[in-house]
Amino acid sequence: MAQKPVELEIPQAVLPNTVFKVVVRIPFDQKIKQVLSNGKAGTLNVGRVIILPDGFKISPENRIPSDIKSQVGKLYFQPYSEADKNIIVVGPIPGKNYREEIVFPILAPSDNINYLKYPIYLGGNRGRGQVYPDGSKSNNTVFTASHSGVIKEITPVDKKGGFQLLIEDKEGNKFTEIVPPGPELLVSLGQRIRVDEPLTNNPNVGGFGQAETEIVLQDPSRIQGLFVFFFVVLMTQIILVLKKKQFEKVQLAELNF
């Protein structure tokens, strides 16, 4: 079943030094189960990363309006780094609790401002990652053979699952492959395999989606000027109507005379 795309909802324009919300939706089928770190099946995790224009960042808690704060809930937002506070990461978090939407409270910049149109990029992940931060594989990916040879032994690691495979190449050298709990074995005892041949299925049922949009940082003086323009137009229309009425009365008086 095809997964629905990532949805991103933001205001069309914002003012400097104001807090606004970015709503992110990454729907998924709740019937789908992912492999957990212990090898058992569970509900999908979700995660988000949003790349804001320079100067934009997550709002301090004391600046967030009460209506937005109630929508944010207890989520914890983490900047990608101290130098890149405009890149915001959240998750992994339980998908069953945040399936519909996640609200980011964003603070617009207050200095070094250019009143332009800016791009905003979003990435959303369904399911667990396939690689840990240290570069090692998680149990949510395909495990492949590091050597060619014949599988001589397949030994269960423990009661939680997982296997240890003993592979012997044509020179008689023996190598051990460890498969953690979760993935299912695709090979059998006595089978000849080649290097990089899959030993397991791919248990990953998640996926990554992305979206982009634009936001306009609006100049307050332009808004004020727009209101002044509307007021002048309105007053001009009123004056023209009054002058027309006055002219009609004069014409009527001259006809009666």
Image (cartoon, rainbow, N blue to C red):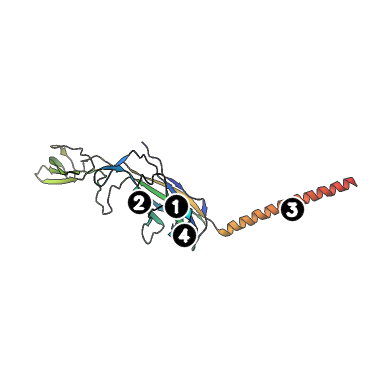
Q: Which mark is residue 91?
A: 2
Q: Does dot 1 land on a helix, a strand or a loop? A: helix
Q: Which mark is residue 63?
A: 4
- Is residue 66 at all visible to an observer of this figure? yes
The kind of residue tagged 1 is Ser
Q: Decide if residue 197 is on the left or right side of residue 3.
A: left
Whether the residues at callouts 4 and 2 have beta carbons within 8 Å, the answer is no
Whether the residues at callouts 2 and 3 have beta carbons within 8 Å, the answer is no
Q: Which mark is residue 239?
A: 3
Q: Quadrant of residue 54?
A: bottom left
Sequence-first disc among 4 and 2? 4
Q: Position of residue 64 (x, y in %)?
A: 46, 57
Depth check, mark 2 against mark 3: the one in front is 2
Whole-number angstrom distance, CA of label 3 to CA of label 4: 45 Å
Whole-number angstrom distance, CA of label 4 to CA of label 2: 23 Å
Whole-number angstrom distance, CA of label 1 to CA of label 2: 19 Å
Q: Does dot 3 land on a helix, a strand or a loop? A: helix
Whole-number angstrom distance, CA of label 1 to CA of label 4: 13 Å
Depth check, mark 3 against mark 1: the one in front is 1
Count neighbours of disc 1 (C-alpha within 10 A) and say few if under 14, some if 14 to 19, many if 20 or more: few
Q: Position of residue 3 (x, y in %)?
A: 38, 39
Count neighbours of disc 3 (C-alpha within 10 A) and say few if under 14, some if 14 to 19, many if 20 or more: few
Sequence-first disc among 3 and 4? 4
Depth check, mark 1 against mark 2: the one in front is 1
List the single residue furthest toward the bottom: 111
Sequence-first disc among 1 and 2? 1
Figure check: 222 above or below 244:
below
The kind of residue tagged 2 is Gly
Residue named by callout 1: 70
Sequence-first disc among 1 and 4? 4
In front here: 5 or 32?
32
Count neighbours of disc 2 (C-alpha within 10 A) and say few if under 14, some if 14 to 19, many if 20 or more: some
